[in-house]
Amino acid sequence: MARALALVLLLFVIEPSVVAQPEEPSSLQTAISPVEPHLEFTLVDPDARVRAWQEVRLVVTIYSGGSPNGIGIDSLALSIPKSLGLRVAGSPRDSENVIETPSELRTPGARIELPPVELEGKPLRELGFSRVLGLLTYRAGKESIVAVLRYKKLDDPVQQIQTKRLDLNVSGHPFGMYAGAIVGAFLVGLFLAITSRPPNVARSFLLRFVRGSVATAIAVLVLQTTSDVHFPVTVTVEDFYGGVLLGLFGDQVAQTIQQRIGQRWRRGRKN
Amino acid sequence: MLASCCDDRSQARVRDGIGRYAIWAYALALVWGVDAAAAGSNSVFCNEVKVWFAHPRQIEPYARIQKLESTVKTLDTMEGRGCEDWVVERARWEYGRDLEAYSLTFPADSQALRSWSRKAADAYQSYIDWFLGLDQERQDRLIQSASQRSRSSSRFSEYRVRWILSRVGNAVVSLGASFVRVRDQSNLLVQYERLGTSAVEVFPEEAVKEWHKWLCALPDFKARRTPREIAKVTEEDPESADHWSDFQDFLERYLQLNPSVRNRWIPIKRRISQWLAP
């Protein structure tokens, strides 16, 4: 009796594994189903900080998929948002950012890893005034670069398209912060010159503006160089608007520092 | 001055007239400007193609085909404006030739071989149609620039025939070969019949032999049968009779143009007449 019970229990234990077996063929079918040609597209250094109008390096790999005679690559181009002010290094003005010229991958399952693709900031003359203004006032945000692969399966030479999107967290160009600092210092200088009405308005405005700009530029520089240092309290300036905010207080801070240094200097002279 | 000699109404008429002329002149300038700009960009493209032909770089066959394909497409959109005929001819001819060569890099009986051969056939067909669409003056100018033979030369007409047979005739032969590779011999017959009715001069004897061969391969057509049996087959199958009838008409014109091959084809022509006789 005990033996019979043990046998029944054993059967119950074995049964799930027996029932699970038929699932195998379906997973196998998924693995061997024909694979379409596709792309892989990432940053060379995934942790690299991407900034508008500043060079960035990408790595692209093309897979031929399961087509029996392989594929012919007609072109591989990057669609880059204009707001980033970037282009494929060396590509001519107003051209499509083509990074791969026609070639073929004859074997199924083959792949080509292209040499790193470098994106560079467009030259100033190509950007124009409005675009430069847009890049200086660029607000940090998410942007997408799309790689467009035009190819033909060699069995059926009809052009097809595969796209791959790369989402990037992009921050503003460092020049944007300095430009913001100057604007902030300008606004404060103007405001104080108008409201406090000193005897020499122009001189007072110019002094406050230059002092505020220089002080804020120093502050931005210090904040940028120490951005990687982990202080208990950290202040980060990301873009143009952060620069403006600093610029608004730049003159006041410079004045305070100037007074303190002046007092010490006078005390030193007396002693 | 105007005020002293004319009344207000005639002044207004003059003003209206000037205004109308100004609008017309502006519109004409605009059209001319747009046209000139298009011609300018066309000639830039054409010069690029000429440079590419003059200094061919060693590139992969696939890349070359892509380049030729885009060149031919652009030349099509230009419709012959801003580019000499010899450039268009060379681009179209090389496109067909390269497609055919590329198709042969695939294993026999593969789908890829058939697909690329189909493309080659389309390219050759388009090349032949383009050439036959040119008037004789343009054809002569093209042959002169491609061969450096003067049109004023007394032997130009002889050279013209030879050039067409070797260049366009080559495309006709390759067109047929491409259809055979695609296993679409019926299209070979259709295309050869179409060309045969309008342009006998582009047929080299090799193409005529190929045409005859595939006619003989029509269903139920066996050379060993007696003329009466074959006549019955053609009578029962009007489509087959049409194919033979077109070939017979073609041979009539072909032999007038090529008397040197008369002896080879006269017996065949006579046999076809027997088969088609009611």
Image: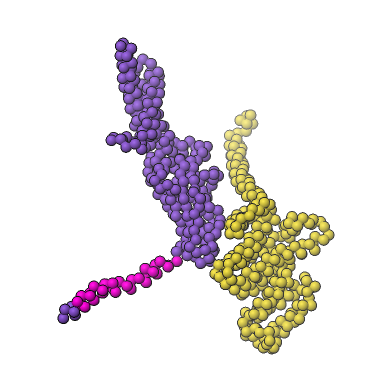
Q: Quadrant of the C terminus of chain B?
A: bottom right
Res B51 visible: yes
| Horizontal relation, residue B248 to residue A231: left or right | right
Looking at the image, residue A120 lies above or below residue B172: above
Q: Residue at the spot x=68%, y=55% of the render?
A: B87
Q: Which of the two residues, B121 or B139, is positioned nearer the viewer here? A: B121
| The magenta segment | A6-34
Q: Quadrant of residue A237?
A: top left
Q: Residue at x 68, y 58 (%)?
A: B89
Residue projecting furthest to the front = A3
Q: Position of residue B176 (x, y in %)?
A: 65, 70
Q: Is residue A65 magenta?
A: no
Q: Residue furthest left?
A: A1
Q: Quadrant of residue B128?
A: bottom right
Q: Nearer the viewer, residue A215 or A16?
A: A16
Residue B42 visible: no
Judging by colour alone, the chain drawn in purple in this rendered image is A
Q: Is residue A9 magenta?
A: yes
> Which residue is painted at 64% across and 80% down in the image?
B217
Q: Quadrant of the N terminus of chain B?
A: top right
Residue at 19% x, 76% y: name it.
A6
Please state the horizontal and vertical placement of residue A101, each as a whole percent of the image.
Answer: 55, 53
Residue B206, horizontal then vertical, whole percent: 71, 72
Q: Residue furthest right?
A: B154
- Classify residue A95 as left or right of residue B240: left
Q: Position of residue A33 (x, y in %)?
A: 43, 67
Give the yellow chain's letter.
Answer: B
Magenta segment's dominant SS is helix
Picture colour scheme: by chain
